Image (cartoon, rainbow, N blue to C red):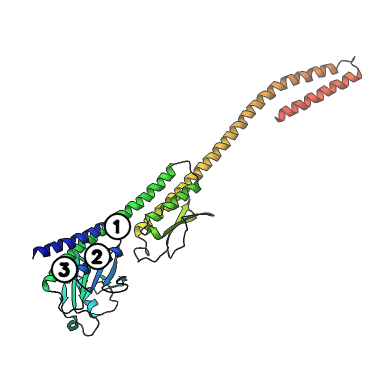
Amino acid sequence: MQNNDLENIRNLSNQIMHLALSGLLRIDFLSEASAILMEFTKSDSVVMWLKERGKFYRSELLRSQKDPFSFEIIPIEKDKQERIIPKLKRDTWLERQSRDVFLGYDSFWTGDAGKESTNTETDYRSIVLVPIPVEGENIGLLNLKKKTRDFFKQKDVEFYEGVAQTLGIALGYRRAQVELRERVKELMCLYGIAKIVEQGNLSLEEILHGIVKLLPPAWLYPDITSARIILDDSTYTTHEFQEGVHRQAAGILVGGTLRGNVEVTYSQEKPELDEGPFLKEERTLIDAVSREIALIIERTQSEEDKEKLQDQLRHADRLATIGQLSAGVAHELNEPIGSILGFAQLLQKDTDLSTQAKKDIEKIMRASLHAREVIKKL
């Protein structure tokens, strides 16, 4: 191999690895990597099949097209060994050959696809099919196509097998980068919720307004994400909330009673992942957020109940104090009133009293008895 070839290999590998470490999403990575490979190989079409997260994906970049890049999820089926395999969409010679290589066969190449195919199903004459291996298992397929006959040579196929190994490593790094970034975003969301609750001086409404703003940045496509929290008859939303074409939700259960839900929506169509376009980790996150909100509500209600109980205790304490004071006052008043009544009764027995004096004494006795009844009620 010439020094120039080695330099080209290093440059190509560096470009692909740099692309992987940037943490692009799957579609963006396949599009950018296909463009790099098309430029390097001078192919007219670059097709990549990829097996990831239990699904099969296919992308294709075409030279000189208005919409050159396409991406699709390949339907699946089971073979005779009950293995999940990609289902052929068009069942052409090239697709059957691609699936065979994808499932573990060796690389394939031809300089005249017209001899291989029984019909004119493709305009491409030179075709290379190379599996993308990772730790002894094929996770993908690289398919290079050229309209020119006998464009690819044997040494090219050997080189592209090395490129495919680099792609396998790059795909693993890309996935790790994306998953790490998403986990960090999810942890930052939960940390942000904890910081809001930690303030302690916020009302439940202020807490929920703060939480709903933390949700969109934690999802895979934050730019098209809206969020909403519904609790009883109240709703808390992000700015310009949209119902969206896709929705992920979790119920808020407080003491076994459904009080509302947490919702995240996408305003645009996105490729299917684990739960529609949502990741399984995002399902875990939204469930965790709904549980945290339920705990916040329970704590808030507990604090409110505690405050009410304290108010009741303070009120009872005041009543007890008043009762003690009343009992003391009643005791102090009953003694002089008893004396007044006793002396009035003695005066009544005096036979020398005038009629007016007797009437005055009766008034004193009635007033004293009335005072005793008032004190008794107190």
User: 289 or 57, which is in the foreground?
Assistant: 57
Q: Where does label 2 land, which residue?
A: 33
For residue 160, which numbered disc appears in the image?
A: 3
Residue 12 in picture, x, y percent from top left: 18, 63
Relative to 114, residue 368 above or below: above
- The kind of residue on which mark 1 rests is Val
| Quadrant (top left, top right, bottom left, bottom right) of the C terminus | top right
Name the quadrant containing residue 18: bottom left
Residue mark closest to the camera, 3 vs 1 = 3
Q: Residue beneath label 1, please?
A: 178
Q: Describe the element under mark 1 as helix, strand or loop.
A: helix
Q: Callout 3 environment at 10 Å: few (<14), some (14 to 19), or many (20+)?
A: many
- In this rendering, the answer to whether 78 lies above or below 7 is below
**Residue situated in front as seen by the camera: 332 or 350:** 332
Q: Earlier along the polypeptide chain: callout 2 or callout 1?
A: 2
Q: Residue at x 45, y 48 (%)?
A: 295
Disc 1 crowd rating (10 Å Cα; few below 14, some 14-19, many 20+) is some
